[in-house]
Amino acid sequence: MNEAIKCLALLVACLALVAVGCGSEPAAERSSDALATALTPQQSPQYYVEQANKYFDTLDTSADPNSVPVYSTLVARWELPPWLWLTGYGRDNMVETTKAALKLDPSTVPTRECRAFSVQPFARCYVSFEYEEGPCPIYEEFVFNDQGEMTFIEAWSDQPGLLPMSDSSDRWAEGSDVHRLSTKIPGLGNETGLIDLSSEAMQRAADEDPEVADFVRRAEDFWPSWLEALGDAGPDYFARGCGWQ
């Protein structure tokens, strides 16, 4: 009997080793500068959809004000033109800028369609904000770390020519020609998803990619770069982004 128990224990141990080997890349073996695509989902699909909806709750005056996603300490929000590029950087900054946006331009987000994906960004949504002037359709993506914290948010106006995919049949941006920044930022793929703006990998990526370089520039000097973007956007950027003109 003792021999049988030992054999069973050995079999269980071997199966456990096989299971570990077949899982996602161990965090210890990932580079600290890994890209977001190095990660695989560690939470349920429902979790990622729920977190995306909690993000939109923070921009919805009719939602529970305590409904807030789990942000990483260095979460970033990148909103493509006609929006203002880097509009949030760091957890505290993200919370405060979102509150300010809701106060300056009150909105609800009654129309939401969010889905979870097995590759980054793990959550992607089509939503429509409702402002006093009318609806504002947006496509948005969310990157997460292994702890389920939201690390990168990227948003586009859902208007002709402004989405990240050129193929109209690729509704959820799964094709090889999708243009997004979130999968080009070194560090979003390490265990915590924390980036280092001064790392060698970041500087190398910035030297090779003007968009990464622009992100680094804006992140290093957030408020002046935000004011610069506001001035460059022009007074009608909201109307253009929402399709009101």
Image (cartoon, helix red, strand yellow):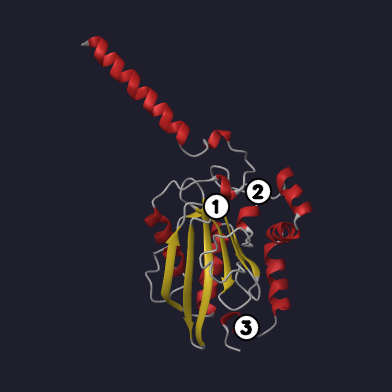
Under mark 3, the amino acid is: Arg
* Label 3: element kind: helix
The disc, 2 or 1, on the residue closer to the chain's N-terminal end is 1
Which residue was labeled with disc 1? 73
Q: Please say if the residues under marks 2 and 1 sit with CB atoms less than 8 Å apart.
A: no
* Res. 240 mark: 3
**Front-most of residues 112 and 200:** 112
**Front-most of residues 195 and 105:** 195
Residue 118: percent from left, percent from top: 47, 52
Q: Is residue 204 depicted above or below 100 in this figure?
A: above
**Front-most of residues 140 and 56:** 140
Which residue was labeled with disc 2? 186
Q: Please say if the residues under marks 2 and 3 sit with CB atoms less than 8 Å apart.
A: no
Separation of residues labelled 2 and 3 (CA atoms): 32 Å
Specify the quadrant that holds the C terminus.
bottom right
Horizontal side of residue 147 vs 81, given as left or right: left
* Label 2: element kind: loop
Q: Please say if the residues under marks 1 and 3 sit with CB atoms less than 8 Å apart.
A: no
| Residue sitting at the far right | 207
* Residue drawn at (53%, 46%) of the image: 39
